[in-house]
Image: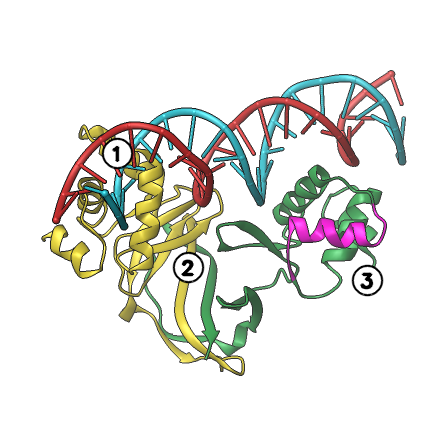
Chain colours: A green, B yellow, C cyan, D red
Amino acid sequence: MNYKSLLKKEGISPTKQRLEIASILLDKPQHLSADQVLILLRRQGSKVSKATIYNTLKLFKLSGLVRELNIDSARTIYDSAAYTHHHFYNIDTFEVIDIPKDEINFDAFPSLPYGTKKDDIEILIKIRQK
Amino acid sequence: MNYKSLLKKEGISPTKQRLEIASILLDKPQHLSADQVLILLRRQGSKVSKATIYNTLKLFKLSGLVRELNIDSARTIYDSAAYTHHHFYNIDTFEVIDIPKDEINFDAFPSLPYGTKKDDIEILIKIRQK
DNA sequence: CTCCCTGCAAATGCTTTGCAACTAA
DNA sequence: TTAGTTGCAAAGCATTTGCAGGGAG
């Protein structure tokens, strides 16, 4: 995957730092906090600043390259898989596991409040060790 | 509703401050942040401190009197309806609207990861103005 | 008297912002 | 040149904690 052209396509100028962040986060389906991105970058010798990571993640979110997950109020997690899917959250291990979209289907769905349209659905199944 | 006996039943000693917080929050189904609870209490002349509100909300959460909602990473919202139900979240108005449990039903449900059991399900339907 | 509770202020931890230096077109 | 970027440090906020004083039994 060519991150340079991906960013350009989204109207984001592909700076060195943004490419580094993209290559860490968008490389595979995963769930990372800003701090985890920083740690991974540092580990490979990158010197991107924390501020730039926060700014870049917000930028990626706005253009839909990543999704923001509000699972734990302590920190925001960015999901590198931008397409709709859902999550298990293991409340004992703090692990987040993807659930493919088609593994969940509704046979009853509520009607939306008047004057509104659907934007997104997030299903979080909290699990724990048996 | 007698909050004093409700708190006792949960093993929480019913202090003046805790009863005030209970009567504001548990009075009806609603979604309030710690800060909103503070504002409502102040408005009726109560002098409960912010620290006590945070501590009490956490206490209520642990005993299941309220549920914690992580909808917006900016603040934690406490839901006074402890029974399972789901939510619409209007991303334009920041409004949270309850969806009764029985208005949503699955006809396909994913199998849980090995060695885990279900704890809770949270469905959040994000909506916006048409 | 003893334990638990309260509330102030300080501390924490995540996230944002101000701003001067820098960079690429 | 010139607008957009970076990164440090400081600021901002929600939340937690330390601790002295207070209250109930």
Q: Nearer the viewer, residue B18 or B26?
A: B18
Residue placed most toward the observer, A129 or A14: A129
Residue type beneath disc 3: Met
Left or right of A91, for residue A114: left
In magenta stretch: residue A44? yes
State if disc 3 and disc 1 touch (CB < 8 Å).
no
Label 2 amino acid? Leu
Which element is circle 1 on? loop
Residue A60 higher or lower than A93, as above or below: above
Q: Is residue D5 left or right of residue B126?
A: right
Indicate the quadrant where residue A93 lies: bottom right
Residue at the spot of label 3: A1
Give the amino acid at mark 1.
Answer: Val
Label 2 resides on the chain identified as B
Q: Which residues are magenta?
A: A31-46
x 33%, y 70%: residue: B104
